[in-house]
Structures are given as C-alpha cells and as structure tokens.
Image (tube, grey):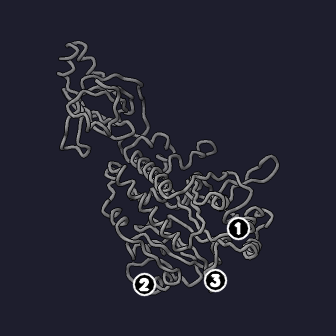
Amino acid sequence: MKDLISIKNVGAHVGETVKIGAWIADKSGKGKLQFLQLRDGTAFFQAVVFKPNMIEKFGEEEGTAKFDEIKHLSQETSVYVTGVVKEDSRSKFGYELDVTDLEVIGHSHDYPITPKEHGVEFLLDNRHLWLRSKRQMAMMQVRNAIIYASYDFFAKNGFIKFDSPILSGNAAENTTELFETDYFGNSAFLSQSGQLYLEAGAMALGRVFDFGPVFRAEKSKTRRHLTEFWMMDAEYPFVTHDESLDIQEAYVKAMIQGVLDNAAYALETLERDTSKLQKYIDTPFKRVSYDDAIDLLQAHENDDDTDYEHVEHGDDFGSPHETWISNYYGLPTFIVNYPASFKAFYMKPVPGNPERVLCADLLAPEGYGEIIGGSERETDYDLLLKKIADFGLDPKDYDWYLELRKFGSVPHAGFGLGLERMVTFVAGTEHIREAIPFPRMINRIHP
C-alpha cells in the first residue's frame, strides 16, 4: 500500500487498498453497516464499514470492538482510514471506500455546527469551524482557482508582480473610507488600493500587478460589501482605454475558465449553472456608455419588472440599477465614461468632454454588481495637480505621484478587481462574506 492519498485522487486507485487522513463530517447506519462521510479538504466521499469484514480481519473480539468504536465516533473526529476504492454510480462523486481498518487520531466532542440548519450570524461567529462544511470548502476551492488563474494570466501576458504597501500616507480614492492608525507619532492609513504605487511600478517595469488585502472604513451592510477584502490591481503603460478593456475582459474570462478547469467538483457542490459561465467565456462582453445606460434605465423605469428608482444624467448608479443593466444584456457589461463629478481624481477626461472621464466599471450579471473598476490615468502634471486641489487633497501628500508626470509621462491605464466579488459571482452564491476565509474575526477580539 502506498502513502496517504487525497480523496480527490481516489479515482486513480479503483480496486486498490489506500490510506486516507480525514475527518468524519457525518455518520449514519444501523446493524452491521456504518456509513462515514469523510472529508480531507479536497473533497467529500463515503466510506462503508461492514462488521463481518472487521471480524474477518481482526477476529471476533477485536473486530467487534473496532466496529463498536467506529459506530460511536462523533462528528469531526479525525481518523486514518484504510480501505479498497470502489466505483459507485449512485454517488455524485463516483466512488466510495470499503473500509478494512480505521485509526482514530483525535476525538471530537460537542461539535457546535451539526447537520441541522443554523442561522448565518451563528455560522459567521463560528467561521473558524464553518469553513469545514461542504459548501464553504467549495467556496474556498473556487477562490483558490481564481487566484491561481490570476497569476497564470498575468505571467502569460508579461506582467511583473509588484507589491504595494499596506500602510500608506495618502488616499487613493475617498478619504472618508480610510482607517487611520498611529505610525510612530504620524498618521498612516490602511491601504484602499495599491493603484497609485503601481503607476510608479509601471513607469519602471512596464506591465505590473499586485494582489493583497485592502480596507474600506465603511460597515459591511449589504451582501456585496466587506470592510477588509482582497484586491488585484494591474497597471500598464502605452495602453489606451479601449485596449485596457480588452485586457480586463480577457482576464475575467481566464479566471472563469480556470475555475471550470480546476474546481469543477466545487461548482457541482455549489450547484452552479456552468452553462452560464461558459456563455460568459464564449460571448464578447457588452460595452455601454454611462449616458446610454441612463437613457436605457429611463426608458424602462415604468416596466412591470423594474424596481429601481428614477435616475438622471449625472447621478451615480445604485445596486438595483447595476443589477437591471447587467441582467438586461445577460452578460458582463462595461459601463464606460462616467461623470467626473463622482469618480477619482486621477482619471483622464474624455477628449472634448471634460465632464466625463475615460473609465469603466464591469458589472457582473445575475445581480452580482461591479467586479472591476478601471480607467485611463491623467498624464498632464498641471491638470493632475488641479484635480488634487479640487478634491480637497493636499498636493504635498502626492508629490511623488505628481513627479511620475514630470519624468517621461506616457499614456497608461489600469484596473482593480475585488476578489471576493469575483468569487461570489463565479460560485453563484448569495453573500460575499462566504467568499473570504475570515470576514469578521475582529469580532472575536472586540465584540
């Protein structure tokens, strides 16, 4: 018999005796049979314990004792299980294990998350244990596949990973969303975005990306928002706004394909309609101007199936507007050229129309909202300096950023993608807090 194998790999060992390290997620049976639902982090599958087999191998007394021990094992007991892998057409997983031996590693008593229904708040308070459930394991596998696909995409497209600081001395976007902390007597802030630093990287290294935690000082009151989340930012020189959209679309499609290729079992567990995901890969994304989107919303605001409020040109979209637009097209949809009045200071104006900026938000269909925000960046030193002042920011805090425009400024663009939004969209799940390993563990420190 070989060393330990993972559950996900049992298909390569049909008819063989294997050993698996696992936890007992659930257990049932009666009489001479016990059915163990095993998990090891890669997959779940069933192991069958037949009492006569135990007696045949270990003798009457020891075999009976071992079977009785197995019969009374509790949820989340850790075990080494040895057995013969068999195909099982009744199981979605396709295989099961005929147990020939079982060794208890660590007992579990009074595990708080039982197979019955629990409220989301209870589950979040016990997130460190909820992660062990079938659904949450699948969510983390989708997340992992998206991260892997991201690194693969950027490596294949000539990007260098360029890590931005988590503690920053200035704001990338809205100063009211900053978490402030003391940095040896000076004010510092938890990063909202690595974008400003990536622009410096792009001027030095060409195509760059970063990937790490960012923070917004706003309470997570909706299923779309988190206070702490992970952001992937990318920046590239000598690229126009439209070319940037091409890169973003290719990246999103690569992530979806990566999940289909590497986390199919997780998608099946989540009961995700993969035909929709395949459609998003095969079909070009829609590109709609902000003003055309406003016209479309106004034209349909009195339809029987609409539930959004009236919106005027110059207004920002709310979640109902974003949901309706993306569902109208049935595809990921870029809304381009928003009003400058509510977009960030670094965005370049649309040529001939300074009230609009060269930017885009990518709205995911099925009600998942914005997953990417990006823009072409302002390259003119004087115009950028004026924008910083107009936004009420101190130019001294951005002196290094302004200098990027003094020494060989070039057209450049970039975007940021919220990982948890992307995970929620691809997984087809309801709440974003399922997409991050520990969305509110701070509550365990300061209730």
Label 2 secondary element: helix
Label 2 sits on residue: 300
Q: Amino acid at mark 1?
A: Gly
Total count of labels = 3
Q: Earlier in the sequence, mark 1 or mark 2?
A: 2
Which residue matches tag 3? 355
Q: Nearer the viewer, residue 252 or 170?
A: 252
At label 2, the amino acid type is His
The 10 Å Cα crowd at callout 3, few under 14, some 14 to 19, many 20 or more, is some
Residue 180 is left or right of residue 283, and the answer is right
Residue at the spot x=58%, y=70% of the render? 375
Residue 183: horizontal and vertical position, in percent? Answer: 77, 48
C-alpha span from label 1 to label 3: 27 Å
Residue 368 lies in quadrant: bottom left
- Mark 1 = which residue? 408
Q: Can you tell which mark lies on residue 377?
A: none
Of the image marks 2 and 3, the number of the one nearer the N terminus: 2
**Of residues 92 and 252, which is closer to you in this image?**
252
Direction from residue 439 to residue 259 in the image, left or right: left
In this view, the mark in front (1 or 3): 1
Q: Amino acid at mark 3?
A: Glu
SS assignment at label 1:
loop
Quote the CA–CA distance across marks 1 and 2: 47 Å
Q: Is residue 336 above or below residue 111?
A: below
47 is higher (above) or lower (below) than 351: above
Question: Nearest the camera: 358 or 67?
Answer: 358
